[in-house]
Amino acid sequence: MTPVLANPRSDRVKAVRRLAGRSARERAGLFLVEGPQAVREAIDADERASGTGSQEAFAGGIRDLYATPEGADRFSGMLDAARRLGHEPRIVTPAVLAAMTGDEGAVTPQGVLAVCRLVGAGLAAALRDEPPLVAVLAGVQDPGNAGTVIRAADAAGAGAVLVTEGSVDVHNPKCVRSTAGSLFHLPIATRVPLEQAITALRRRGSRVLAADGDGRTDLDDLADDGALAAPTAWIFGNEANGLPPEALELADDVVRVPLYGRAESLNVATAATVCLYATARAQRKRV
């Protein structure tokens, strides 16, 4: 298959590459989705939307699709699914794809790239179905950690993720990669004032727990007492500074993950995974 776009310095390539920056994403209303797994999830999200007749409020949507000749051959089935939805992939050279992602030094190019509309739901929409398990990111600024928490929330069956003001943009390329496609699976409300998020969660019957290494309550004790079986929202804080004081004050309880070995602490993504899965298990047992 003959490459169509071969100039890494073309205006189109520059426009795509600019989406690595937050201001450019916000102006365009678009973000980058790199690699076959994430692109497949974006295509699946569009397919689900086409089946219901309307785009899910949180799922974004593909605007442009790019593939190298090797990527087009390797992921032909996935790209055929995209074509059925009206997304004809533009064939580009590996150098062009690398320039689009800013990864010119990549030894093994990902092969496919999508430009998608920004994902996201408003707070009311994210909590509309009163999800029994919700993750709240309060000031989480590392994109890899934020993406991993979103992925863990999705894996644990959470119904929504709320991202407060001062947190990383979930459309940051590293964050998107870290979600491994989970960005397209559940409602994510962004730039939500923390107090507003907690008020909305309580109004819908959720108990709000703040995860903190110095918490007064042990996670194991909550699990043993059956307290995690109730609708629960977990607040996870900044990697370096922990939770903001208002989160500790507003939460119904401040909970620590027990450390049985000699490790001083857990990073926020690992602690979030433990808390979310403990809650998901308790809620499944109750059902």
Image (spheres, grey):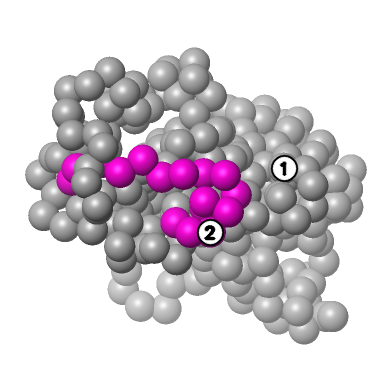
- The numbered mark, 2 or 1, whose residue comes first in the sequence reads 1
Dot in front, 2 or 1: 2
Q: On the rendered image, what quadrant is the C terminus found in?
A: bottom right
Asked if residue 118 is among those painted magenta in the image, a careful observer would answer: no
Contact between marks 2 and 1 (CB within 8 A): the answer is no
Residue denoted by label 1: 55
Magenta stretch: includes residue 89:
yes
What crowding class fits label 1: few (fewer than 14 Cα within 10 Å), some (14-19), or many (20 or more)? some
Relative horizontal placement of residue 2, taking residue 201 as reference (left or right): left
Residue on which disc 2 sits: 81
- The spot of residue 4 in percent (x, y) is 26, 37
- Does dot 2 land on a helix, a strand or a loop? helix
* Residue 153 in which image quadrant: bottom right
Q: Is residue 46 left or right of residue 104?
A: right
User: Quick one: 262 or 269, which is closer to the camera?
Assistant: 269
Q: Which residues are magenta?
A: 79-94
The reply to whether residue 280 is visible in this rendering is: yes
